Image (spheres, rainbow, N blue to C red):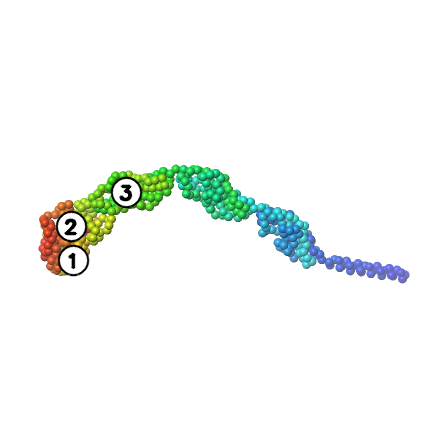
Amino acid sequence: MQYSKSILFFLCLLVCITSIVCDEKSDKKEAPTVTTASITSITVTTASGGGDVTADGGADITARGLCWSTSQNPTIEDSHTTEGSEIGPFASSITGLSPNTMYYVKAYATNDVGTSYGNQVTFTTNPILVPTVTTTTITNITSTSASTGGNVTADGGAPVTARGVCWNTSANPTITDSITSNGTGTGAYVSSMGNLLPNTTYYVRAYVTNSAGTNYGNEVSFATGVVVLPTVTTASMTNITTATASSGGNVTADGGAAVTARGVCWSTSQNPTIADAHTSNGTGTGLFISSITSLTPNTTYYVKAYVTNSVGTSYGSEESFTTLTIGDSYQGGKIFYILQPGDSGYVAGQSHGLIAAPTDQGTSIQWYNGSNIVTGAAGIAIGTGNTNTNAIVAAQGAGSYAAKLCYDLVLDSYNDWYLPSKDELNKLYVNKAVVGGFGDSNYWSSSEDNVYIAEYQYFGDGGQYSSFKYESYYVRAIRAF
């Protein structure tokens, strides 16, 4: 009986010990378990991977992801991703890689016990390739320029840093030949080629560059146009004076090359060229206006428009004209004097002078307006008659006296007539025959001697005298041009 009790006690003790051991075993925690997925979507600098946490080891997962290195057995001390804290599969993007390089990858999972790793997988990033480009058809061909371009269809796995077209007169041009620079990146672009030679065959290729090198598109060829002489027409002559005239031309075609000079040339002989006197009126096609100066009065000139390009100079049709001279009708009257050096208003190379009205403005006209006053009309030289007339009219006001008749005159829309000064009146006397309409009579000047006396001239013999302002003499208006 005592033996049976001993056995029973031993069995109870064994059951208790077994229960305690089992409880301790059930409370034990382990590191999680994880597997590594295969690597996909491999590029030059990126790839995709992932893993699967299949057990948490009895404790919460605190981190999971991928780690990688160029050496075997990477750990979380190397480059890694962090992809949450759950049991189950996950995906990761691997970035910042080097091209054409082998990498070792493991999935990892972490809990309170520690970090465990999945199986190791490997992959190699793609190498960087040269980009690809196609060459656009040549358009807008002239004798010195053309348009083309390209289309970068792939960057080769690295940024495109340069693109454009290259050309040469030999096949297979490269970027060591003539090139354009048309930005960066993929896609289509347009290129303009300039400074080409006329009537020449060129070979063209698009090019594109990245860190792997430069690649070229298909080769295309074209021939530039033939350059000929440009064409120009000569404008009619206008604004003819004693020393100047206006003309011009119209460059109707550039001949296939840039117009570098244009204008008109003139001479007193027929068929003038640019070796004679000429103007320079810019470049390009289209209309232009030319001012011809420093001419001689009463002289016939021959004029041609000219235009120049790289081939040479061509000329328009010839025009001719004769400069004005004393006795010619002009601007409402007849020219009776051309200004000379030293005269007021004279400008070298320009045409200025005096014009007389074709008829007298009166035959029995007093100088004053009924009262003897000093008007201040003291000028006697050429160029002072207009100032004298304005002073007389300002001082004497309205009326029908010599200066006022000239002041109010309008002929052919010209309204700036005046009573000539003493010296201007004498020039009118000298050329009275070509002007016409003068009798052997006394003509008033605008030159005042004093409160009672003014100057006049007898057109019978040219004598110049002084007379009382109340005397009645002839009046002939003049104007300046």
Nearest to N terminus: mark 3 or mark 2: 3
What residue did someone put label 2 on?
427
Going by the numbered disc 3, the residue's amino acid type is Asp
Nearest to N terminus: mark 3 or mark 1: 3
Image position of 343 (left or right of 147): left
Q: Alpha-carbon distance for marks 1 and 2?
A: 18 Å
Which of labels 1 and 2 is toward the front? 2
Q: Quadrant of the N terminus?
A: bottom right
Going by the numbered disc 2, the residue's amino acid type is Lys
Q: Alpha-carbon distance for marks 3 and 2?
A: 35 Å
* Relative image position of residue 277 (x, y in whole percent): 27, 44
Residue for point 31% across, 41% down: 306
Going by the numbered disc 1, the residue's amino acid type is Ala
Nearer to me, 356 or 70:
70
Q: Alpha-carbon distance for marks 3 and 1?
A: 47 Å
Residue 378 is tagged as 1
